[in-house]
Amino acid sequence: MTGDAAVTGATATPAQEKARARNYDIATHWQLMWWKFKRHHMAILGLSLLSVFLVISLVPEFLSPYGPHTRDLRYAQGPPMGVHFFDSDGEFHARPSLTAGRASAIP
């Protein structure tokens, strides 16, 4: 019998139980960790996400819309922008923005 039934022992015969126990007895530490890791769905999801991040970090030039040395010359001498939670109309947004608001002074 193969699949989850052999692993969990739900419908395994005594001979299959003995063979499964022997596999655990001779398995290396890495094999035991891998078998347990494969059953943990959130761990598999996390590994998949980290793999995607790794691939993106290896090919940023291909994915980037601009070259690494491209600059916006209109904003070359501008000061750094702060994080704003209020837009130019004065409305609060939980998602911060990096755009500058109005350029008027507070009276």
Image: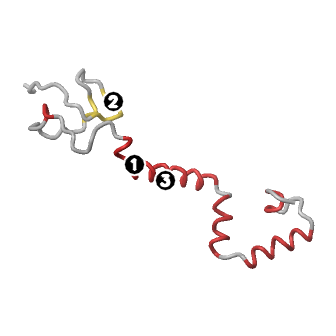
Residue 47 picture location, percent across and down? 54, 55
Quarter of the image where the C terminus is located? top left
Q: Closer to the observer: label 3 or label 1?
A: 1
Q: Is residue 26 above or below residue 2?
A: below
Mark 3 is on which residue type? Leu
Q: Is residue 97 left or right of residue 36?
A: left
Q: CA distance from mark 3 to mark 1?
A: 15 Å
Q: What residue is rendered at 16% in x and 41% in y?
A: 80
Q: Is residue 23 left or right of residue 100?
A: right
Mark 2 in CB contact with mark 1 (< 8 angstroms): no
Instruction: Specify the label residue 50 is tagged with.
Output: 3
Q: Is residue 8 above or below residue 50?
A: below
Q: What residue is rendered at 19% in x and 30% in y?
A: 100
Q: CA distance from mark 2 to mark 3?
A: 30 Å
Residue wearing tag 1: 59
Mark 3 in CB contact with mark 1 (< 8 angstroms): no
Q: Earlier in the sequence, mark 2 or mark 1?
A: 1
Q: Is residue 64 left or right of residue 54?
A: left
Between residues 85 and 63, which one lies in front from this camera angle?
A: 63
Tell me the SS state at disc 3. Answer: helix
Q: Earlier in the sequence, mark 3 or mark 1?
A: 3
Q: Residue furthest top?
A: 89
Instruction: Specify the label residue 93 is tagged with.
Output: 2
Q: What residue is rendered at 8% in x and 27% in y?
A: 105
Quarter of the image where the N terminus is located? bottom right
Mark 1 is on which residue type? Val
Colour mapping: secondary structure
